[in-house]
Image (cartoon, rainbow, N blue to C red):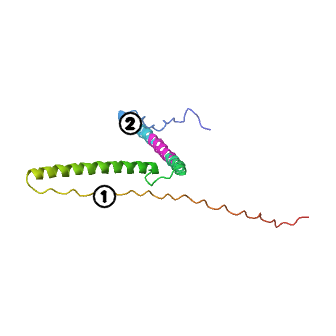
């Protein structure tokens, strides 16, 4: 055996110095901040994707409910909306025709005062608005009942 007094005690290998310098603290704070921002971004993106999926599902449901109630155009207008728009257009056309007649009358008065020949007012024919024919959806016939399948097992 060896004598403990004669054994030479050696020092442990030098440890790495602790990283307490200001540059190391800034570096670790920056990494922590970047990690936090990344996590917040991932959570935000997933939340937005979930909301988009939910909105698409609710929009599809809303469209299905609206289309089941009243027929609409591809832009979402109902027949009542289109009829109201047609009435507004015909009112505006009547106003424009009256305004044009007033302008022609004023022009004729000015030409008569100047000794020129009067312009005859053109007869403008109002277009007739055709009412669209709404086709009622035809219900599909109910499928015929099929007989129950026969069992291939032997009974005793």
Report which residue position mark 2 lands on.
Answer: 24
Residue drawn 21% across the image and 56% down it? 121
Bounds of the magenta span?
39-54
Residue at the outermost left position: 114
Residue 96 placement, left or right of 137? left
Residue 78 appears in the figure: no
Q: In front here: 146 or 1? A: 146
In the rendered image, residue 52, in percent from the top left (x then y), is placed at 48, 47
Please, is residue 22 above or below residue 151 in the view?
above
- Quarter residue 22 falls in: top left
Q: Quadrant of the C terminus?
A: bottom right
Q: How would you classify the magenta stretch by its main secondary structure?
A: helix
Q: Is residue 72 magenta?
A: no
Please, is residue 145 above or below residue 80 in the view?
below
Q: In front here: 58 or 101? A: 101
In the rendered image, residue 47, in percent from the top left (x then y), is placed at 49, 43
Report which residue position mark 1 lands on.
Answer: 125
Q: Is residue 45 magenta?
A: yes
Gap in Å between the C-alphas at discs 2 and 1?
87 Å
Please, is residue 61 above or below residue 147 in the view?
above
In the rendered image, residue 28, in percent from the top left (x then y), is placed at 41, 37
- Quarter residue 24 falls in: top left
Residue drawn 28% across the image and 57% down it? 124
Q: Quadrant of the N terminus?
A: top right
Residue 144 appears in the figure: yes
Q: In front here: 154 or 19? A: 154
Residue 111 placement, left or right of 71? left
- Counting the numbered discs, the total is 2
In the rendered image, residue 72, in percent from the top left (x then y), is placed at 47, 52
Of discs 2 and 1, which sits in the foreground?
1
């Amino acid at each position: 055996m060896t004598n403990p007094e004669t054994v030479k005690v050696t020092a442990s290998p030098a440890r790495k110095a602790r990283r307490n310098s200001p540059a190391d603290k800034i570096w670790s704070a920056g990494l922590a901040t970047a990690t936090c921002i990344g996590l917040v971004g991932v959570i935000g993106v997933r939340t937005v994707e979930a909301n988009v999926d939910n909105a698409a599902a609710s929009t599809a449901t809303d469209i299905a409910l609206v289309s089941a109630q009243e027929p609409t155009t591809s832009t979402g207008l109902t027949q009542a909306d289109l009829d109201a728009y047609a009435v507004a257009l015909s009112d505006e056309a009547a106003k424009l025709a009256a305004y044009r007649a007033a302008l022609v009358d004023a022009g004729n008065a000015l030409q008569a005062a100047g000794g020129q020949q009067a312009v005859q007012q053109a007869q403008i024919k109002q277009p007739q608005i055709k009412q669209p024919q709404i086709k009622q959806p035809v219900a599909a016939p109910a499928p015929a009942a099929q007989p129950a399948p026969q069992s291939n097992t032997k009974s005793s």
